[in-house]
Amino acid sequence: MRKRAAWLFFIQNFKSEVIKMASISREMRQYLSEQAAAQEALNKVMSSADAKAEGIDAATAALKSATAKVNAQKSLDEGKTFDEAGQEVKDEPKPKDNDTHSKYASMDYRKAFMDYVKTGKKSNLLDFRSADTSTGTSDVGAVIPSTILQEVIKKVENYGQVYALVRKLSIKGGLTVPVLSVKPVATWIDESTPSNRQKLSLNDKITFNYYGLECKIAASILTDITTLDLFESTVIEVISEAMIKALDIAVIKGAGTSSPMGITVDTRIPAKQIVTLAPADFASWKAWKQKVFARMPAGYKANAVFLMASGTFEGYVDGMTDNNGQPIGRVNYGIINGPQEQFGGHKVVEVEDDVIANYDDAATGDVVGVYGDLSNYAINSNMQMTMYRYFDNDKNQLVDKALLFADGKVLDPNAFVIIKKGAAV
């Protein structure tokens, strides 16, 4: 009776231990199940009135074998965590000091970068890279901290009204890629007919090159700055202002040789979508409908916008009326965002005169407006900048130069209508 009571106590204690082990591996669950079955078998033998020694010995040996498996697995599971399904839960790897993002955002890197820009001292903490041969310089520059870079990009996207509307890519420079790979087209399919590769004008291929966009900063502007916060905010303001202007100009009229190719320079724009408006036509709603709106293919109209100088919109479009005397250039004044200009139901993006010439100042034949879907233009860049320091012999001063590599091209030339100033009749 004492032996049977001892086994009953062991069973109760074993069950309580199983209940405590809520997070266990799948293997441990299997071995515990086998152990419990062996324990139940031994309990049944011990409870039998006609139990024999042979049966008790066999059941005891089976329980010992199952227990040995449990103990061995317990050693393997030591220090590990398992989910409800018994799968091991592994901790996410913690970012190391040499991880790219954490390195460029670290306080040590930012301070070393400030010291390099102010004094030219090259710290081992900084990541130095050589300039591309196309820039004509063999110097090496320090990678700008990600904290500065993110703010520059944010400002460019917020204030660069043209840049904000174009497609952004990060394709390795020098590769020739089909337009459809960066501007996919959806097609309907059924159960038996797969989607075929598109055979459209978009089958054209484009190559993005490495063009350097540089922003020169006189070292004297940054030399006397003492705090890191003020240094970074000054660098952000100076670089972003220059980059915004250069990127917007490049999208519209970049030459395509040492800079991205602008929309108005691309020779692939269909001839019928390059419109010249004489002064009388420029002030006529009917002429705009016939010669500008009607030239845009229907598939691109939904997201099309107008790009023009502020003086062009305010002086000519905003005051234009239709045949019934109704104003065409409608302006809705929002509470937060201010005036929201529209022309013929399309948004008007006002740009600086050096991006698109003001109608009054433009010469005959100059571009005075662009009408199109800017998602069909792509800027290709990883948006990583480096800072170089050199001595300008002409001006006899040290100069810090921020350098960004980028290219841009029209993806689909059918998405744009170019508007030029015509001669007076």
Image (cartoon, grey):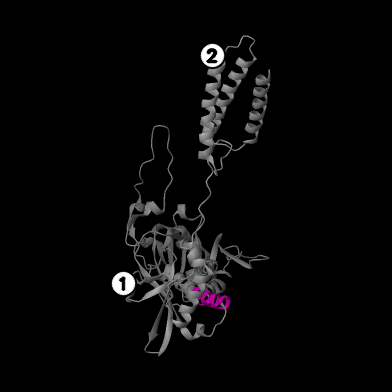
Does residue 68 appear anywhere in the picture? yes
**Dot 1: within a 10 Å radius of its alpha carbon, few (fewer than 14), some, or many (20 or more) residues?**
few
Q: Mark 2 packing: few (<14 Cα in 10 Å), some, or many (20+)?
A: few
Residue closer to the observer: 108 or 326 = 108
Quarter of the picture holding the C terminus: bottom left
Q: Main SS type for the magenta part?
A: helix
* Residue 62 disc label: none
Label 2 vs label 1, nearer the camera: 2
User: Residue most toward the top?
Assistant: 50
Is residue 42 placed above or below 199 in the rendered structure?
above
Q: Which residues are magenta?
A: 228-241
Give the amino acid at mark 2: Glu
Q: Which label was assigned to residue 54?
A: 2
Residue 87, position as x, y percentages in the image: 53, 38
Looking at the image, which residue is at 40% across and 74% down? 141
Let me know if residue 238 is in the magenta part: yes
Please give the name of the residue rendered at 59% of the width and 37% of the height, measured from the top-left corner.
Answer: 84
Residue 128: where, in percent of width, then height?
40, 71
Q: Position of residue 186 (x, y in %)?
A: 43, 45
Residue 373 can be seen, yes or no: no
SS type, badge 1: helix
Q: Position of residue 224 (x, y in %)?
A: 53, 85
The kind of residue on which mark 1 rests is Thr
Residue 146: say if magenta. no
Q: Is residue 413 left or right of residue 163?
A: left
Is residue 312 depicted above or below 285 in this figure? below
Q: Which residue is mark 1?
A: 133
